[in-house]
Amino acid sequence: MISETTRGVFVISVTPFHLDGSIDWQSLDRVTDFYFETGADGLTILGMMGEAPKMTQAESIELSRRIITRAEGRPVVVGVSAPGLAALRDLSVAAMDMGAAGVMVAPPGSLKTDPQIHGYYGQVTDTLGADIPVVLQDFPLSTGVHISDDILGRIIEDYPSIKMLKHEDWPGLGKITRLRAAEAAGRRRISILCGNGGGFLVEEMGRGADGAMTGFGYPEMMVQVVDLMGRGEETRARDLFDAYLPLIRYESQPGLGLAVRKHVLARRGAIASPALRRPGAGLDPLSVAEVDLMMTRLEQRLKELN
């Protein structure tokens, strides 16, 4: 299970669909294998970029079972965010019974004050119990919930089953620095894995992050950058990161990023179709041409680096 010292790259998995919107189970197996073959330490499923809100509860459970089984003991974190705690608990218990490494919970957008945020995570950890490790997803650009340093610190101190922060505040590099400074002064340590499509990965690792928990069409980039930064080879990490930067930038477009990611994964053979489940649309022909050009240029740049 995940812990306060978990490190590495947990790729946020896409959910492959057929053109009719049904889950493509064969592609799900293929992309799960693909992530681990590219070096992922673990997976996170049913996240926002896994189109979790478009799933039924039954689909979420079956998808979790399929991936956890396919992972063969390698850690899988399951996103369980839900409007109500009953549904959140049911999926959490089912996932942990299947062998999940932990669950991820984002705050609902209805939380507006620090006491509400603190109280919500108290209710979550009380509902799940002390034995289920929790990842707190801090993604205000999506949730609309801004978790201050003070309230995040209180949550860490008061709820020990929260083992990890999925950090994707933006701008948020200073938050990592302040978290690590508080730990150096005696506060409990938690693992910090970062999101935002890997767009700030070099800087995040430099500030004290333990790795990445996000998606990208080339997950091996994140694996290699985290490894290089961990070995103190920052210049090589930056050179490698810079080669992928055009695609990272293009994929970071709100509302378009998942379509870009799925197109790249389909081009790479990891999934059969780039289809999104409705509501959601794929790329227009001009966008496809732009992404394809960036992929071609990336291949050339990587040859130069090697």
Image (cartoon, rainbow, N blue to C red):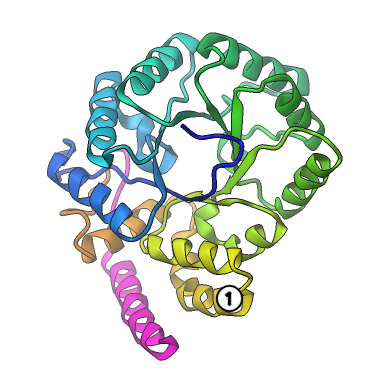
Residue ID for mark 1: 238
Res 216 quadrant in image = bottom left
Query: How crowded is the residue under tag 1: few (<14 C-alpha within 10 Å), some, or many (20+)?
Result: some
Residue 183 vs residue 85: left or right? Answer: right
192 w.r.t. 264: above or below: above
Q: Quadrant of residue 278?
A: top left
In this view, the residue in front, 133 or 154, is 133
Magenta residue span: 278-306
Per the image, is 108 magenta?
A: no
Is-magenta flag for residue 296? yes
Drawn side of residue 126 relative to residue 247, left or right: right
Where's residue 113, x and y in %?
A: 75, 22
Asked whether, in this view, residue 62 is left or right of residue 46, the answer is: left
Amino acid type, callout 1: Arg
Q: Is residue 225 above or below residue 40?
A: below
User: Residue 225 at x, y = what percent?
Assistant: 52, 67
Total number of numbered labels?
Answer: 1
| The image quarter in which residue 290 lies | bottom left
Which residue appears at 70% of the width and 35% of the height? 146
**Rendered residue at 28%/41% (across/down):** 71
Horizontal and vertical percent for residue 193? 57, 47
Q: Residue at x 40, y 45 (%)?
A: 42
Q: Position of residue 46 (x, y in %)?
A: 37, 34
Residue drawn at x 60%, y 61% is 200
Q: Is residue 265 left or right of residue 20?
A: right
Magenta span: helix, strand or loop, mainly?
helix
**Local SS, label 1:** helix
Residue at the farthest bottom position: 304
**Vertical comparison of 303 with 222: above or below:** below
Residue that sits furthest to the right in the current view: 185
The quadrant in which the C terminus is found is bottom left
